[in-house]
Amino acid sequence: MGFRFENKMLYGYSHSGVKESEQVTSGYVVNFNSAVGYSVSVGGHSSGQPEVMQQTTYYPFGYTLEQSNYYSLWSEMNKKLYNGKELQDDELGGVRLDWYDYCTRFYDPQIGRWNSVDPAAEERQWLSPYNYCSLNPILRVDPTGALDGGYYNYDGTYLGSDGINDDKVYVVNSIDPETASKGMSSSNLLALRDKDFHSGSTDPSATLLSIKHSEFIAIAGTLYAVGSSTFGEAAGIYSVKRNRADAKGKSVYDIAGGGGIYGWSERDKINSPLANKDWAKNANLAVIEGVQGSKDYSVGAFYWHGKDLGLNSWTVSKDYYQVGFNFTNTSHDLWNQGNKVSDNSGWDYKYQSTGAAGNTTFMKLTYAWIKANKCKGKW
């Protein structure tokens, strides 16, 4: 990192160019922090010229390599050091902590690890929950201790991470599929994030989604596990979860992890090297479309089932088909079962189909059953 002082303005430079600028006036201190290896505290002298009050260099994981202080005896020493985080130098049992406060948790640069587990650890089971920056502090930055920011192409292809652990997720509007399939570097993704987007422009740019990346990964993984052989199948299942969420005043993430959904326990399969890439893209795209839009791909369904609906000896068939099922359109009858009239005199059908996609049939309770059973909800 380098610095230049001009007309009472202090400019800080990193390897990528001008990082930021601050006006330096008498009695005030400006701190500049490089993402890797260096920080400096500059104060405004009464003469109007800047004076360096502190210089610190670090090992990649943040342990102090060397520090020079030029404070006067009555000055308060700067504690915002590595990555601009405040050093906690209190003593515990006669030993100085030297931890950094990252808001979400505390970081110990002496061992290059967090002192508590990652709040999104279950979404990255292949990494230690105490790891810092995926063990790559030179290429990655972690401003809060949360999950990396992720980028996805408009077709659901995962492009890569920006290396900033802020748990944000972005969708890029127009990267061609061939380029997207190769992934993109952190610097290129950040350039897309910071690019101004103008209406009608076809230039690539990244849009922030209104969901945490950890939640995005969990929901997409659940869709992959239960059914994403086609986009319509994955999108329909997402819509069912959203219908349930709206009815209960909860989020789709709450519904996905709230129990009773098989795919939640199998959601990490989407991260396997053996995962079907097209199915993974369908799952990702279903979440993107679901977060950004309001279309109900299930056409009002509150339930879905796959091949098990057509297997008469299976519990699903007994609980959903054999109790009375009406296929409202023959295209919904994926397993050529035909309608099943119930044995109950109060209603002919308990469930009716609303649509079908891939290997999945979407359904809801019939009005006759809801009325006969005085059911207050829809599922």
Image (cartoon, grey):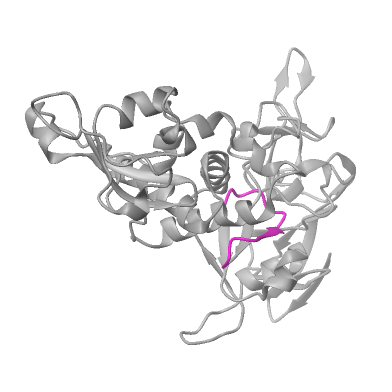
Which residue appears at 8% of the width and 33% of the height? Answer: 371
Position of the N terminus, as image quadrant, is bottom right
Q: Does the magenta-highlighted stretch encompass residue 294?
A: no
Q: Nearer the viewer, residue 60 or 251?
A: 251
Q: Nearer the viewer, residue 368 or 15?
A: 368
Looking at the image, residue 297 lies above or below residue 10: above
x, y (%) of residue 51?
78, 63
Position of the C terminus, as image quadrant, is top left
Q: Is residue 36 visible?
A: yes
Q: Is residue 47 visible?
A: no
Q: Please tell me how many numbered marks the rendered image carries.
A: 0
x, y (%) of residue 136?
83, 46
Q: Which residues are magenta?
A: 154-168
Residue lying at the far bottom of the rendered structure:
200
x, y (%) of residue 261?
45, 31
Question: Is residue 231 rendered to the left or right of residue 247?
Answer: right
x, y (%) of residue 234?
48, 51
Q: Quadrant of residue 312?
A: top left
Question: Is residue 295 rendered to the left or right of residue 124?
Answer: left
Looking at the image, residue 258 lies above or below residue 158: above
Question: Is residue 307 rendered to the left or right of residue 41?
Answer: left
Predominant secondary structure, magenta span: loop
Q: Does the magenta-highlighted stretch encompass residue 155?
A: yes
Looking at the image, residue 316 lies above or below residue 225: above
Which residue appears at 44% of the width and 40% of the height? Answer: 253
Q: Quadrant of residue 9?
A: bottom right
Which residue appears at 64% of the width and 36% of the height? Answer: 268
